[in-house]
Amino acid sequence: MIDLTKFQALFFDLDGTLLDSWPGVYDAYVQGCQYFQPGADISHIAALRNDGREYKKAIQYVFKMDCYNEQYGDQVARFYLEKLSQNAILFHGASEILAYLNSINKIWGIVTTKEKKFVREVMKIFPLLNTENLICSDDVSNKKPDPEGLLKIITKTGLIPNKQILYVGDLESDVNAARAAEISSICALYGYVSPREALLTWRADYYINTLYELLSR
């Protein structure tokens, strides 16, 4: 068990870690293809589940474009937001761990490759996710595995990078970003990860099968 009382702060990735957003994301991309490219092959979209690329790059991938198309991106975003309340759920233990962190006045926050316009809508549906300690893809020039986002949130919370700071994520880029920021990593094996690959090669500091494992007993 990880005793969170011994750590200075706990930061989370969002998609695949606190929020199971993939059903809604996938549905929006499929709707987008049906809208702009009826009959087009959509088999490649499934690979985005554990890809971790930011939204504009994902749009290019889905529609097989060399450059981002704002019209396509805006329409897919509308499809996503229209059904967000139906398609997004918190992973088991997310509500409990955030409530626990608040109860012990532990510093926590979110560092995600999701764009802020989407994160704000998610927070309306799940108020417990609301935090001033938030870094989105819009806030950085370099995405994970670059440590820029983590270093920004560490500075924002008045801390100095050290192994008493934890970052929870489900992708290899999360683990590598934490290592580059010189903080501790927790790999969420329940997320969008291949557990076998993560256990064999990623070298995270800790592994969890559920967020409940972070609760003090």
Image: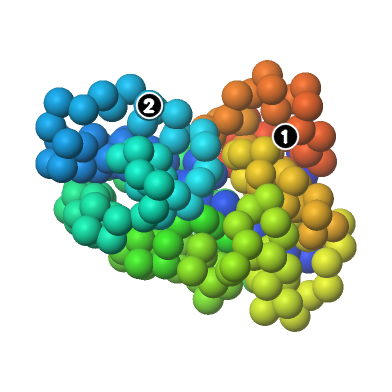
Q: Is residue 48 above or below residue 77?
A: above
In the picture, the quarter occupied by the N terminus is top right
Quadrant, the C terminus: top right
Query: Which of the pair 4/153 is nearer the observer?
Result: 153
Query: Is 93 on the left-hand or right-hand side of 36?
Result: right
Of the numbered discs 2 and 1, the one sitting upstream in the chain is 2
Of circles 2 and 1, which is in front?
2
**Is residue 167 depicted above or below 139 in this figure?**
above
Amino acid type, callout 2: His
Bin the neighbour count of mark 1 within 10 Å (Cα to Cα): few under 14, some 14-19, many 20 and up. many
Measuring 63% from the left and 62% from the top, which residue is drawn there? 142
The kind of residue tagged 1 is Tyr
Residue at screen point 15% across, 26% down: 39
Whether label 2 touches label 1, CB < 8 Å = no
Residue 110 lies, with reference to residue 21, above or below; the image says: below
Residue 66 x %, y %: 40, 47
Residue 163 vs residue 142, the one in the foreground: 142
Residue 125 x %, y %: 30, 59
Colour mode of the rendering: rainbow
* Closer to the camera in the image, 40 or 15: 40
Is residue 143 shown left or right of residue 122?
right
Extreme-top residue of the structure: 196
Instruction: Determine whether, in the image, residue 209 is placed left or right of residue 122.
Output: right
52 sits left or right of 142 in the view: left
Which picture quadrant has residue 211?
top right
Which residue is under mark 2? 44
Give the number of the disc on residue 207. 1
Element under disc 1: strand
Label 2 crowd (10 A; few <14 / some 14-19 / many >=20): few
Q: Residue furthest front?
A: 66
Residue 194 shows in this picture = yes
Estimate the x, y position of residue 61 in percent, counting from the top left: 40, 40
